Amino acid sequence: MSIVRGLLISNPNSTSITDSLVRTVVAELRAVPGLSLRAEFTAHPGHATAIATGLTRRDCDVVVCMGGDGTVNEVVNGLLGSAADGRPVRAADDIPAIAVIPSGSANVLAGALGLPRGPKSAARMIADLLRAGEERTISVGRAADRWFVVNAGLGIDAEVISAMEDLRAGGVRAHPLRYVPAALGAWNRLRTNPPRISVSADGEPIGRDLPMAVVSNSNPWTFFGDLAVVTNPTTRLGGGLGFYGITSVSGIRGMVSALRLVGAGRALWSALKVEDRELRDDDVGAVTLSSPEPLKLQIDGEYVDERRELEITCARNAVRFIAPAEAREYGEDVGDTVWWRRLAAVLGRKFRALPLPRRRGGREGRGGH
């Protein structure tokens, strides 16, 4: 029996992490024959990068990331490093594989990899995949001297993420439903004074004066609760990058475009021909974004800074992930039911999870009999 050396890096501030959940995840992983596991908790932003920096396959076989997309991003940046030419310091076969136990608010990469986005279910699947030795190699993007696994963008998505980080700094926990007012507020601000982003892909101009520009490494672009939001149906984790932009946010079609970015309103934007305002380019190796004014930048769901120009490149076959070799690929039709039924299901689960008020009287605690 071969020994598999694992390192669990856990973000205790991630949305759903509890002591009970950590014990459950560790028990699932330690049930894998031959797996030895040591754990480290992150204490501050960038700590996961520091822990993973310099690790090779001589040190461990797999790094288990328990957290959100930001934790995975930090681990990828630590493992890959960066050479002077912006390429990874180490090849995929020279560094540990990564396993994702999603416990953040969005967990886009886990969903794109075909993993359950619930941490307990994901832990069970990761344990099964480790037993079977199943993995896949994916590409990563690079922007602002950082690697990313999900997406990087200027414009509305960065505005929304910046607003959500302000809320979290004030003690408000991240939740998909809280993104709606943040998204609509950012959208209205951009409608008043829209950005003017110019875009080139692989050296060819493809758009100018765009109010929003996103470069994706994954498909879907994000999740709104359980709703997969697909901007680039043919983008694949194992291929090049996908570009998505909108040419205008004015008028009623501009408001419908906002619905599109939270996974809703497909019937409306089809009827109003909102797709006429969409620009896409898939499987590209390099994208350049530029703006006459500084714009907010987000990378993998984290606000970075403001930029006038951004060079984004792709490193193919860069990282091995413990994941199904053949994951679900999201196309234009991303659900078995219409969006409002899926949204109702999300709200129903959230409502049922709320604690019930305690009843007063002598029958309390007797099961209502």
Image (cartoon, rainbow, N blue to C red):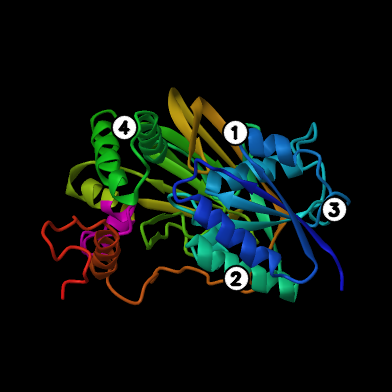
53 or 357, nearer to the observer: 357
311 or 263, nearer to the observer: 263
Point out the tag, 1 or 2, that comes first from the N-terminus: 1
Q: In the image, is residue 273 part of the stretch drawn in magenta?
A: yes
Is 18 displayed left or right of 181 in the figure? right
Between marks 4 and 3, how big is the CA–CA gap?
A: 47 Å
| Three-letter code for the amino acid on which mark 1 is drawn | Ala
Q: Secondary structure at mark 4?
A: loop
Q: Which residue is mark 3?
A: 57
Q: Residues within 10 Å of mark 3 (few under 14, many from 20)?
A: some
Q: Secondary structure at mark 1?
A: loop
Between marks 4 and 1, how big is the CA–CA gap?
A: 38 Å
Between marks 4 and 2, how big is the CA–CA gap?
A: 44 Å
What residue is drawn where x is 36% and y is 41%?
173
Point out the tag, 4 or 1, that comes first from the N-terminus: 1
Q: Which residue is mark 2?
A: 125
What residue is drawn where x is 73% and y is 76%?
132
Between marks 3 and 2, how big is the CA–CA gap?
A: 23 Å
Q: Which residue is mark 4?
A: 194
Number of the front mark, 4 or 2: 2
Contact check, label 1 and label 3, Cβ < 8 Å:
no
Between marks 1 and 3, how big is the CA–CA gap?
A: 25 Å
Question: Residue 143 at what x, y percent from top left?
Answer: 61, 37
214 or 103, nearer to the observer: 103
Q: Which residue is mark 1?
A: 43
Q: Which residues are magenta?
A: 259-275
Question: Residue 319 at what x, y percent from top left?
Answer: 72, 54
Between marks 1 and 2, how big is the CA–CA gap?
A: 27 Å
